[in-house]
């Protein structure tokens, strides 16, 4: 898996450790971390034409309403850190909720590869929340946080 990441919020090593801990045994071809909206323009060529149009024309992405997306045809996950504003401008909160989005999208990769079709959004949300909360101590160590964090079921 190729990781495209500017490194402000995560190192590639941190991302690789966290993804390995998920133990889903399926990976996308590419993981792209978009810290700012303008990063989309830089990485948009990484996906096929149909997915490009989806990215460009989806107002919910540009409006910060989408935290991540998995493009099945391109086998690419985009994580939109710029959409994380739940707790204001708190750096660790953005990291935490972006990791939740990563776990959610990684579950979609698993679902697609295993032909899982029942309640996919609910399943992905449940997986992500359970992963973050049950691994809060591990995540705190990998991310070098002083405290453990948890998320609530969406």
Image (tube, rainbow, N blue to C red):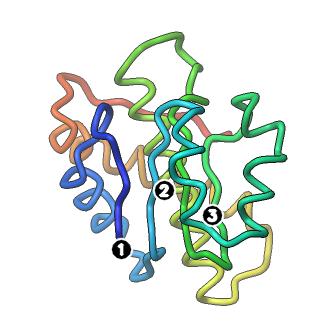
Q: Residue at x 21, y 47 (%)?
A: 138
Task: Give the mark nearest the N terminus, 2 or 1.
Answer: 1
N-term-proximal mark, 3 vs 1: 1
Q: Which residue is mark 3?
A: 70
Q: Is residue 110 above or below residue 14?
A: below
Q: Work out whether mark 3 precedes mark 2 in sequence or the reverse, and give the earlier one.
A: 3
Q: Which mark is residue 1?
A: 1
The CA span between labels 3 and 1 is 14 Å
Marks 3/1 in contact by CB < 8 Å: the verdict is no
Of the pair 124 and 80, the residue shown nearer to us? 80
Point 54% across, 47% down: residue: 101
Q: Which residue is mark 2?
A: 103
Identify the secondary structure beneath mark 3: strand
SS for callout 1: loop
Badge 1: residue crowd in 10 Å (few <14, some 14–19, many ≥20): few
Mark whose residue sits in front, 3 or 2: 3
Q: Position of residue 122 (x, y in %)?
A: 73, 58
Tag 3: Cα neighbours inside 10 Å, few (<14), some, or many (≥20)?
many
SS for callout 2: helix
Alpha carbon separation for disc pair 2 and 1: 15 Å
């Amino acid at each position: 898996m190729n990781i495209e990441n500017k490194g402000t919020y995560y190192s590639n090593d941190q991302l690789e450790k966290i993804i390995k801990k998920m133990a889903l045994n399926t990976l996308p071809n590419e993981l792209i971390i978009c810290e700012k909206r303008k990063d989309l323009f830089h990485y948009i060529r990484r996906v096929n034409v149909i997915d490009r149009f989806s990215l460009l024309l989806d107002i919910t992405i540009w409006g910060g309403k989408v935290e991540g997306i998995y493009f099945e045809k391109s086998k690419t996950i985009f994580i939109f850190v710029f959409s994380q504003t739940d707790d204001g401008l708190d750096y660790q909160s953005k990291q935490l909720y972006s990791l939740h989005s990563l776990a959610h999208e990684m579950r979609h990769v698993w679902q697609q590869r295993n032909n899982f079709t029942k309640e996919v959004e609910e399943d992905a949300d449940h997986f992500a929340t359970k992963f973050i909360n049950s691994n809060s101590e591990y995540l705190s160590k990998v991310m070098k946080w002083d405290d453990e964090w948890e998320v609530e079921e969406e």
